[in-house]
Image (cartoon, grey):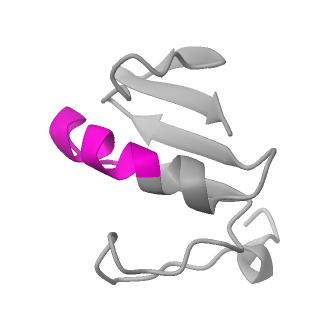
Amino acid sequence: MAGVGDKVTFRNEDLFDTDIRKASVLTLYLSLSVNIKLRPRILETLKRAARVLSHDFNMGDWLPDWTERVDGLVMSAFGT
């Protein structure tokens, strides 16, 4: 509806093996423990200024740039 379908890629792959180097935005809906395990890989792999959006679960002591609550869900954004 927004006309941005050509700008988004959905991938069903192992998140610890998937090549995320080209991602400018990484959206996660994972548990806290998985977010924390994935965090070093995100910080080492993503380009500077990429954004990480996490639904409902934070990233441990990596504080978000902003957090918003929408319809009972929490969305937090983290910069790399």
Spot occupied by residue 70 in the image (x, y as percentages of width and height): 48, 22
Relative to 75, say whether 24 is above or below.
below
Spot occupied by residue 42 in the image (x, y as percentages of width and height): 51, 53
Relative to 27, say whether 64 is above or below.
above
Could you tell me if residue 28 is visible in this image? no
Relative to 20, say whether 49 is above or below.
above
**Number of numbered discs present?**
0
Left or right side of 65 for 57? left
Q: Is residue 39 magenta?
A: yes
The quadrant of the image that shows the C terminus is top right
Query: Which residues make up the magenta segment?
Result: 29-40
Left or right side of 37 for 73? right
Q: Tell me which corner region of the image, top left, top right, bottom left or bottom right, holds residue 55.
A: top left
Residue 56 or residue 49, whichever sits in front: 49
Give the residue drawn at x 50%, y 78%: 10
Q: What's the magenta bit mostly, secondary-structure-wise?
A: helix
Spot occupied by residue 45 in the image (x, y as percentages of width and height): 59, 62
Give the residue drawn at x 72%, y 77%: 5
Give the residue drawn at x 57%, y 54%: 44
Left or right side of 74 for 63? right
Residue 49 or residue 66, whichever sits in front: 49
Could you tell me if residue 40 is visible in this image? yes
The quadrant of the image that shows the N terminus is bottom right
Residue 10 or residue 41, whichever sits in front: 41
Q: Is residue 17 magenta?
A: no
Give the residue drawn at x 26%, y 47%: 37
Residue 11 or residue 47, whichever sits in front: 47
